[in-house]
Each structure stands twice: as C-alpha cells, then as structure tokens.
Image: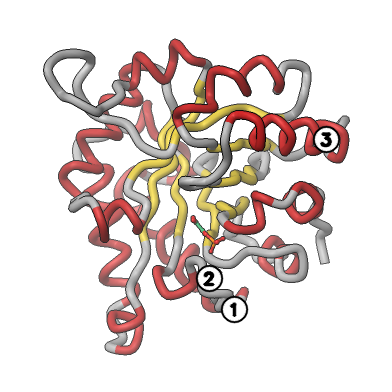
Amino acid sequence: MVKPLIAGNWKMNTTIQEGAELVVKLRELIKGVDTVEVVIAPPFTSIHHLNFLIADSPMTLAAQDVFWEDRGAYTGEVSPWMLKDVGCRYVIIGHSERRQFFHETDETVNKKVFASLKAGIKPIVCIGETLEERERGETLERVSSQLRGALNGVGEGLLRDIVIAYEPVWAIGTGRTATPEQAEEVHNSLRQLLYELYGMEPVRDVRIIYGGSVKPDNIDSLMAQPNIDGALVGGASLKAEDFARIVKFRHV
Ligand code: PEP
C-alpha cells in the first residue's frame, strides 16, 4: 500500500499573513498525522515564509507551476532549482487552469516534468477531460493521451517520484464532483495504461490522486475506491477545518 497523498492547491489566494494563519491552524488540527502525506501549494510569494512554519509538522510544500530551464533570460519564470532552494518537495504541473489560461500543452508539461525530476522535485501532473469530451464519450481517450504526453521519455526509474492527478475539468471549482465510480473508472484505466507502458513493478508505488470539488462530505467515499490514492483539493484547502477533515479521511 502506498501512502495516500492529500494536497491543497491554494491557487492565487492568500497573503503571507493569511497563509501563515492557515498553516498555524492546520498544524494544530493535523498534529500527529503520519499515515497520509500532506502537501500544501501556496502562491510563490508565501513559500519561503511558510517553509519555516511547517517545520515539525506533517506538511510539505509544493509550488503551483515551474519553468523548465535552470536559469536565464526568462522574465517572470521560476526554475525547479529555485523551488528546491526555497523548500519545495513537489510541484503541480499542467493544472487545467494553466492549460486553459496560459496555453500549457502536453509538450510543455513533459518538459516541466523532466526539469523537475532532474532537480529532485516531485511533479504532481494534472490531467482531465472537459465536459464536452465526457459527453462525447472521449474521457478515457483524452486522459490517456495526456498521460502519455506528460510521461513521454520518462524512464521507469523516475516513475515513483511522479504523482498523477486526475481532475475532470467540469468538476474543478464547480461544486460538481465526479462520483466515486466515475473517478474509479478513470483511475483504473490510467493504472492499466501505466502497467502497459512500464510493467507492474515500477507502477506499484505511483499515486493517482483525484481532484475536483473534493470536500469533507465526499472524501471518504472517494478514498474508499481501490485506485484512488489521495486528493488534490482546491477551494476546501483554504479552510483549515475542511482541509484537516479531508486529510483525516475515514475508510468507509
Ligand atoms: C484544483 O484546483 O485542483 C481543484 C480540484 O479545485 P476544487 O477542489 O476547488 O474543485
């Protein structure tokens, strides 16, 4: 059994002060949790400060994006080495909001995955279909092609450092969650694809987590599915009590 991973994507929210208050509350609420890996992804501007506040807590840090070059004339970008330097262990790559608003493609996702792994940062790679794709019956085809694209050229030795986040676009920030059965169907087929690409052994430790309106009242049934290894949480990760309840999910 791999350790489940619950990650909070704060998106473009929180000042340093607000982030600090959230982390202080969370520290208390999830004290002693060691059966789940807890990751928070604050905005870049808060990471350095929060790195001190999460010491001796179950939390580790992720960034919400990264560029693929190490350094140079790339105004506005942040490299994997810089993330490492500031204390990040993970980075979210290819979130649907970045695909939608910032022209992220499977190719750029793939470059970011490689660059992050090279720097020792674990990518949380987001994939997911739109509502139109689901309605046309193209869900599995779409997520399979995104997964293939993201992992293009990634050898089996690096696979265990990658987390796959299945996030149906129609469920993100909409309050509309995939049913546990809908999510499980996709997770299962993603796992089968990983088996096809890499064989059983390297895939055993790969976590496939679900994202899309995860809340305290649906986390337990999602986590009861055999191929759901955690959650990527947006809105509910900004409320300490809600996120703590999600972290402390119960097996139903
Ligand atoms: C997300 O941003 O990755 C996400 C899943 O958001 P929400 O939980 O708000 O749907």
Residue situated in front as seen by the camera: 111 or 19:
19
Residue 250's place in the image compared with 25, above or below, is below
Image check: 19 left or right of 21? left
The reply to whether discs 2 and 1 touch (Cβ–Cβ < 8 Å) is: yes
Residue 19, image x, y percentages = 64, 35
Along the line of sight, which residue is nearer the eye, 50 or 116? 50
In the image as oriented, which residue stretches furthest toward the bottom? 135
Instruction: Tell me which numbered mark, 3 or 2, is placed earlier along the sequence.
Output: 3
Residue that mark 2 sits on: 183
Residue 151 x %, y %: 27, 43
In the image, what residue occupies the spot 60% across and 58% down? 235
Dot label at residue 158: none
- Circle 1: element type: loop
Q: Mark 2 is on which residue type?
A: Ala
Q: Quadrant of the C terminus?
A: bottom right
Which of the image's four quarters has the N terminus?
A: top right
Question: Which residue is at a point 37% across and 64% down the rendered structure image?
Answer: 128
Please determine whether, in this image, residue 13 is positioned above or below residue 170: above
Q: Are marks 3 and 2 in contact (CB under 8 Å)?
A: no
What's the residue type where badge 1 is placed?
Thr
Report the residue at 59% width, 54% height from top: 233
The residue singled out by tag 3 in the image is: 33
Circle 2 SS class: helix
Q: In the displayed structure, does residue 89 sit left or right of residue 157?
A: right
Q: Front-most of 49 and 8?
A: 49
For badge 3, the amino acid type reads Val
